[in-house]
Image: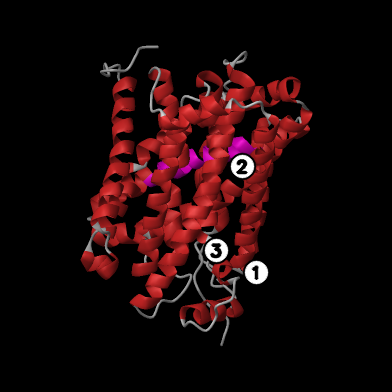
Amino acid sequence: MAEASLKTPTGTETGLSGATERDIRAVLDGRHRGRGRFLLFTGPAVMASIAYMDPGNFATNIQAGAKYGYQLLWVVLVANLVAMLFQALSAKLGIVTNRNLAEMCRQEYSRPVRLAMWVVSELAAMATDLAEFLGGAIGLALLTGMPLLAGMAVTAVVTYAILTLERRGFRHLEIVIGAMVGTIALCYLIEVFIAPIAWRDAAAGLVTPRIPDAEALTIAVGIIGATVMPHALFLHSGLTQHRAVARDDSDRRKLLRYSNREVVIALAVAGFVNMAMVLMAAAAFHAGHSDVAEIDQAYHTLTPLLGSAAASVFLVSLLASGVSSSVVGTMAGQIVMQGFVGWRIPLLVRRLVTMVPAFAVVAAGVDPTRALVLSQVVLSLALPVPMIALVTFTRRRDLMGAFANGRLTQAASFAGAAIVLGLNAVLLAQAFGLPVPGLAAD
């Protein structure tokens, strides 16, 4: 068999190796029943999961834990469950239709609607890049003392270098991103053991929904925006649409089973990381340093409170997060642009499209952590675009056939979308100074 020529999200034809494609075919045909067969299908959800551990999560989770202790842990849990559902739907769309979410929008919606959706999605991509570049730059600045703008430039160069690995085969890129996901998870596993966490209070915060005040609402919406990411929904469908060739519905069912398992595992890891961020911030800062709201402030405060090891681990995780999420953000941006308007542009140009606004924000002197939190709110406001489209497409039998959402899945997806849309509506009301019943003033 010749080498596979599957298109990757950035447009190269390398894709998976011929050997990997043969092994995947053997699994689908029932000829390969080895224990390692699951690993052949691992990659798309791991790649998408890095969007749930990007520097925006650091900013919102630190603020949530420092100011409100364990009270907003339930928001992280709900956001992660919603993320699991919608990433599974995104993967299913790509597997069943062999088209990604942006391509489906271009096919099914009128030109004015899809252009408006593209503009909103590009703005979300810029907000994403702002968070990713700032995270990597802050980490480098704390590590080396270099200026923030210089750190952003270094992050951009490293990101582009990693993206070029795709020329050697897409699996190489998946392995690098997977290693970074593992690094972030390991760092926060260490943090959980170092920080003096009040586990009983943490358990109560995980299962007791409450929003203490208006500022907590802003942070909660930021958590939603940092956890359920618009570009991750576009990306996942693009990663699954050409990964394996399904010859019939039997193949599609097998692919969906492997995909759903990977989504649960990858997003469970991401959920653990997000909860660990809040736990660490609550344990370290809430009692006597509840004013900690900036990443660099958190780093410097961790050293006297929990020791240099905790601060160093925090910094390593931030660097891995900034670089890896920037790589994944570039891939998602390419899928969005090509899917909505049919343009395929060089990677370097794609980087510049969303990178320049991030540099402009920093050059203007905007507080980095404040910019991170606001970027997550922008992402949350942009999220209804892919969420509503995804729910609409995956329920249609003319598109999905036998794989259209069942009643339970459809009800859950409507509920998830309603949660996000409801939080967005409350946030907009708050932004325009309108009273929100039942919400205490600051």
The overriding secondary structure of the stretch rendered in magenta is helix
Q: Which residue is mark 1?
A: 168
Label tally: 3
Q: Within 10 angstroms of label 3, few (less than 14), some, or many (20 or more) residues?
A: many
CB-based contact (under 8 Å), mark 3 and mark 1: no
Element under label 2? helix
Q: Quadrant of the N terminus?
A: bottom right
In the rendered structure, which disc, 2 or 1, sits on the residue that comes first in sequence? 1
Residue 197, given in percent of the width and then of the height, sits at: 62, 27
Question: Which residue: 50% across, 73% down?
Answer: 6
* Residue at the extreme front: 200
- Say whether residue 306 is left or right of residue 108: right
Element under label 1? helix
Can residue 260 be seen from the camera position used here?
A: yes
What amino acid is labelled 1 in the image?
Arg
Q: Which residue is mark 2?
A: 322
Q: Quadrant of the C terminus?
A: top left
Q: Nearer the viewer, residue 205 or 327?
A: 205
